[in-house]
Image (spheres, coloured by chain):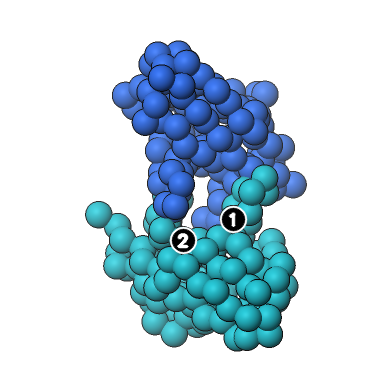
Chain colours: A blue, B cyan
């Protein structure tokens, strides 16, 4: 299976709060897990990514937590800002083949002022 | 910075027309992809290419074809556009380690 399940579909967070988006996968052959951020009218942009040999990666206010045994990974946005309002996609790549990414269905995040 | 450029931001075409969506990348990436994005469905892979003149079907290739005559250019072709192909189309290129870079998207409306 190549499915990546993402939740929630939408999320409203107060400014300064923590936004958490979750993804789960079935295929243990995935070896690369990126998160993409997309603003309206723009293409997705790579935000942060992790490989399964680490459990956490942090870049500024953005952190990926990775649980290999549970086959789950999540994006945490600390001190969420209105400028973080966007659609977020998780994805996963198979460790063989041509680097194709399988995407979750996306989460629309709204950070209220 | 990697740049992936799609030739049109917005297109309106009539049912039955042949439609060409063009994409150019400037980073000498071997892998290029076409996705379509629909609300609630995320990004779905239509076709990808791992080398010049090479192509592979993605998850939803029906009604589409592709062309890659030069390494930097990857074209998506709708042979006979239909209203259910109204969507946002995204082109991407990637490095072997997996990082993919997207264009700004083409919003296609078929009437």
Q: Would you name the residue on which mark 1 appears?
A: B37
> Gap between marks 2 and 1, in whole Å?
9 Å
Q: Position of residue B33 (x, y in %)?
A: 51, 64
In the image, residue B16 sits, relative to residue A45, either above or below, namely: below
Marker count (numbered): 2
Nearer to me, A52 or A35 = A35
Mark 2 near mark 1, Cβ–Cβ under 8 Å? yes
In the picture, which quadrant includes the C terminus of chain A?
Answer: top left
Q: Position of residue A83 (x, y in %)?
A: 37, 31
Judging from the image, what secondary structure is the residue with disc 2 in? loop
Residue A47 appears in the figure: yes
Q: Position of residue B41 (x, y in %)?
A: 67, 49
In the image, residue B13 sits, relative to residue B96, either above or below, namely: below
Residue A65 appears in the figure: no
Check the image and name the residue furthest to the top.
Answer: A17
Q: Residue at 67% of width from left, 45% of height from top?
A: B40
- Using the image, name the chain to which the residue with label 2 belongs: B
* Dot placed on the residue nearer the N-terminal end, 2 or 1: 1
Judging from the image, what secondary structure is the residue with disc 1 in? strand
Q: Would you name the residue on which mark 2 appears?
A: B105
- Using the image, name the chain to which the residue with label 1 belongs: B
**Disc 2 residue crowd, few under 14, some 14–19, many 20+, Cα 10 Å:** many
The verdict on a common chain for dots 2 and 1 is yes
Q: Residue at 62% of width from left, 42% of height from top?
A: A104
In the image, residue A6 sits, relative to residue B99, either above or below, namely: above
Residue B41 located left or right of residue A61: right
């Amino acid at each position: 299976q190549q499915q990546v399940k993402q939740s929630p579909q939408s999320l409203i967070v107060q400014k300064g709060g923590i936004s958490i988006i979750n993804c789960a996968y079935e295929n243990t052959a995935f070896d690369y897990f990126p998160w993409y951020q997309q603003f309206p009218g723009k293409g997705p942009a790579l935000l942060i990514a992790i490989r399964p040999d680490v459990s956490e990666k942090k870049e500024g206010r953005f952190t990926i937590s990775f649980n290999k045994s549970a086959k789950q990974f999540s994006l945490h946005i600390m001190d969420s800002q209105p400028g973080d309002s966007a659609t977020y996609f998780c994805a996963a790549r198979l460790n063989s083949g041509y680097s194709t990414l399988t995407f979750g269905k996306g989460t629309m995040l709204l950070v209220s002022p | 910075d990697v740049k992936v450029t799609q030739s049109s931001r917005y297109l309106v075409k009539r049912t039955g027309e042949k439609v060409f969506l063009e994409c150019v990348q400037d980073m000498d990436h071997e892998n290029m992809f076409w996705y379509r994005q629909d609300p609630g469905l995320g990004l779905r892979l239509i076709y990808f290419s791992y080398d010049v003149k090479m192509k592979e079907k993605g998850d939803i290739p029906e009604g589409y074809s592709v062309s890659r005559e030069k390494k930097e250019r990857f074209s998506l072709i709708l042979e006979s556009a239909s209203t259910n192909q109204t969507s946002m189309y995204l082109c991407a290129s990637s490095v072997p380690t997996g990082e993919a870079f997207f264009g700004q998207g083409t919003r296609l409306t078929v009437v």
